[in-house]
Every structure is written in C-alpha cells, then in structure tokens.
Image (cartoon, rainbow, N blue to C red):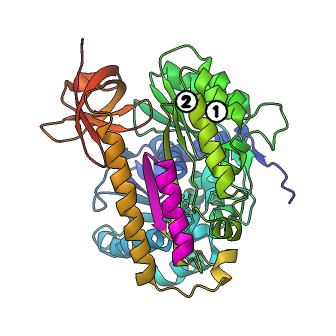
Amino acid sequence: MSYVRKEISIDEIKKQEEICLQIKEILCAEGKQPMALVDTYGCQQNEADSEKLRGYLQLMGCGFTDDEFLADIILVNTCAVREHAEMRVLGNVGSLNHTKKNKPDQIISVCGCMVQQQHMADKVKKSYPVVDLVFGPHELWRFPELLLKHIQSHKRVFSRCESDGVIAEGIPRNRDSKVKAWLSIMNGCNNFCTYCIVPYTRGRERSRRPEDVVAEARELVAAGYKEITLLGQNVNSYGKDLNCGVDFADLIRMINDIPGEFLIRFMTSHPKDATEKLFKTMAECEKCAHQIHLPVQSGNDHILKRMNRCYDREKYMQQVEMARSYMPDLVLTTDIIVGFPGETDEEFEDTIKLCQDVRFDSMFTFIYSKRQGTPAATMPDPFTREQKQVHFDKLMAVSNAISAEKHKAYEGKTYKVLVDGETGKDEYNLSSRTNGGRLVHLKGDPALIGKFINVKITSSNTWALYGEIDNG
Ligand code: 5AD
Ligand code: SF4
C-alpha cells in the first residue's frame, strides 16, 4: 500500500484565513455578529476537528450558540463508526427544516466521516435539500473556501474528494476547555480491522512531525493547559511513516521534558504493537498518566482473526501483564464488540472470561454495526439483534460489577486529582480526574478548576468516585 505524504502549505492555510476575513465582511455587513453552532458526533479526533472548524468560524467574526434557531451557520461534524450515530445525525439534520423555515438565510453544512462515504453523501444530496454544504475530513482545511463558494453562488456545494488524506499545520483553533486539550499527533489508520469504516473515511496513517507536535504542546503548557491528550487512531504507529527515528514512546518523552505541571494522556493504542518501550517510558515519565485504553474487541482467537486484529488472547494478556508490571497502579480500559458476524455463544463466553481475568477499570461495549464496504459486511451474520442484545446485557452486567468493585477500593484513600469543571449539581459541584482518568465528584470553590488538589474518596459507584478535599 503506497501513500505519498501530502502536506498543505502554510501559504494555503494563510489563504484560507484571508477568505475567512472576506466572509466576515459579507456576514457582518449589516453590523450584526453572525452566530455559529458546531454539533460534533463521534470520537475525540472529531472533537479536535471541530475546534479547528470553530477556529475558522471565529476568524469569520462568528459568535457561538447552542440554539439552532439562533444560528446563522450550522455545522454538523459527523461520525461513521456505527449506524446508530448516522441515524442520529440524519434525524437531527432533518429537523433543521424547521429552523431554516424561520431563518431562510441559515447555512447548513454536514462534514466529517459520514459524508466521506459516497452513498451517504448521495443520500444527503437527494433526501436532505436543507443542507447547503457537504465536505469530508480531508477537506476540513479548506472549509472557508467551500463556504465562500456557497455564499457567492447560492448553490449547494458537495465537495467529497477521494484522498488518502493530507497533513495541514497551522489551522486556527478555538478550544473547548481551558484546562484539557486534545493534541492530534497523527491521522488515519492502516489496520483495516474487518468491521471498521475508519480506514476508508480517514485515509492512511500520517504522522505530524515531532517538532510540530512538541511546539503545539509547548504552546498549550504556556497557555496554562494542565492535561494534554495525544490523539491518533493508533498512536503506536506514530512516526513509522516519517522515518525520522522518533517513535511514540520518544514523543511522550519529548513532551514530558517540557517544563511545567501537566499530565500527558493518549488514545488509542492498538494491542498488536504496544511495546515494552512504551510501558517503560510511561512508567519513567512523571507527567505521563498511568492509564491506557487498549481495545481488545473480543476474547476469542477465531473472532480476533476474522476481525484482522493481528493478536490473539495470549498476546493481549501478555501485554496487560507487562504494562502492569511497569505500572502496578495502571488504569486499563477497553473497547469490545459484541455480535461480530457469526459470533457463537461459546466465542462470546471467551470475551466474558477475558474481562473477568483482566478486570478492566471500565469498558466501552458496542453491538456490531454493519458498515457498507468493509469485509465484515459480507460475512454471514446468522444471529438476530435480540440474541446479540442478550450477550450485550450480560457483558454490561459483568463490566459494571467489576468497575464498581474497583471503585470501592478507592474509598478511604487520598488521590491527587485535576479539577476540570463544574457539574451543575449542588452537593458535588466540581468534577475532576485522578491520574488514571477516573472521574471524581467533589464539593469546592470553582476557583479550583485547573488546579491539582488532593481528594479523599468517601464513596463510589460504577461510574464515578465521590470525595472531599484533603488538605492534611
Ligand atoms: N460496529 C460496532 N463497533 C465498532 N467499532 C468500530 N467499528 C465498529 C462497528 N462496525 C468500535 C470498536 C472501536 C470503537 C472506537 O468503536 O470497538 O474500538
Ligand atoms: Fe478501526 Fe481497527 Fe483502525 Fe481502530 S485500528 S480505527 S478499529 S481499523
């Protein structure tokens, strides 16, 4: 598989920024600030993309709203991983008929992975006339140009480019939080797990240069961010396409060397190529959280093979053991797919057994969703949705019980947490995270947001810990 790295030059991004100013003149002509709404579905990579879209919108002079009736521009940044997310998007886009009736000049755009699939772009074109602008993830960098085209022509713009993906540095950002930041280190995926649409929508693996990643991390630390989450579909492949001698573990060390008090997290790690060097580096770098999201997907070797995961149960268990030997306090989470085509009761029981053996801190469980164009979509799938639901419910019960037991063990102990926001509830008004990423609710002054403090855990349930500030 050959992929030629395609970098978008800084000049091209500058051109997009100039277009933003041109759009600002048009939109602000009547002296009123235009309002924008960016609605994001799916993964953290999409959240990071939406921060770029909002960066451009801010340059266009837009303010931001959550109310679709007030928005002059609506951008729906979509996900394609499961059918359920696509259905939600289509339902919500359909309901925008009402808002556009009230506000005929409203501009509605659908972008992201869902519309990178030709059949979904066609569906939007045919059945959702309310949509003015459609573009896929490879064209996010030229959103201003596409928007201007629509504004000037008053025509619907559908721009879906067949591409293995690009690298674009320097796109302006409007970040969601002042405490926690997403830092995308690479894009795309080369793994082609047989159930997954991502390699088709996000293209081939391409890493940002280490100096660009480190420069962005430095900026974030200087701006006061306390938690940086490095993002990639498979961070363990970082750097392989660059041949620059820097792998993911090296990158963590480079970021760890930046002076300041902050935490480094990352996701997602593919178990096939998580290395001892990575676990050792995590243990040695004091800013790196002892947390790893290591999606296992199934505990059965036959299913793992048919998923094209390139590891078996034994290799996965070895990885877990090795990671825990370096970090006994490691928080380990996973993803599991239930009901992969043809998965039998016995094969499913192997997944339950693996979960009981590993005892994940928490698990994200999904019922298999058929994705058009993937190899699994053509595999015989004899079991009904109801049968899969029974397995799903059983796995959830096992997972919830383990999470609750693991949380119980925190009670009575004191942990350093990063306070990251308000909950909107009286009793426990602040939310925070432990080093391993567990959610802790506590009562305290909102001025603590963005600070590391000690909290004594007083109670817990399956989903969260509850605590009080421990000054002693
Ligand atoms: N059906 C169900 N779950 C899926 N995932 C990816 N593709 C599918 C699919 N077709 C899950 C995997 C992955 C997570 C992000 O989404 O568990 O790790
Ligand atoms: Fe999808 Fe597999 Fe790539 Fe993850 S590693 S994005 S599950 S193909």
Q: Is residue 344 visible?
A: yes
Q: Mark 2 belongs to which amino acid? A: Met
Write down the region rendered in magenta: 345-366
Q: Position of residue 174 (x, y in %)?
A: 46, 39
Question: What is the chief secondary structure element of the magenta stretch?
Answer: helix
Q: Going by the image, does 414 lie left or right of 87?
A: left
**Magenta span contains residue 244:** no
CB under 8 Å between discs 1 and 2: yes
> Which mark sits nearer the N-terminus, 1 or 2?
1
Q: Which residue has dot 1 on it?
A: 279
- Ligand 2 has an atom within 8 Å of the beta carbon of the residue at disc 1: no
The three-letter code of the residue at mark 1 reads Phe
Between residues 356 and 191, which one lies in front from this camera angle?
Answer: 356
Q: Is residue 369 above or below residue 105?
A: below
Q: Residue furthest left?
A: 426
Q: Which mark is residue 327?
A: 2
- Element at badge 1? helix
Name the residue rendered at 40%, 30% in the picture. 179
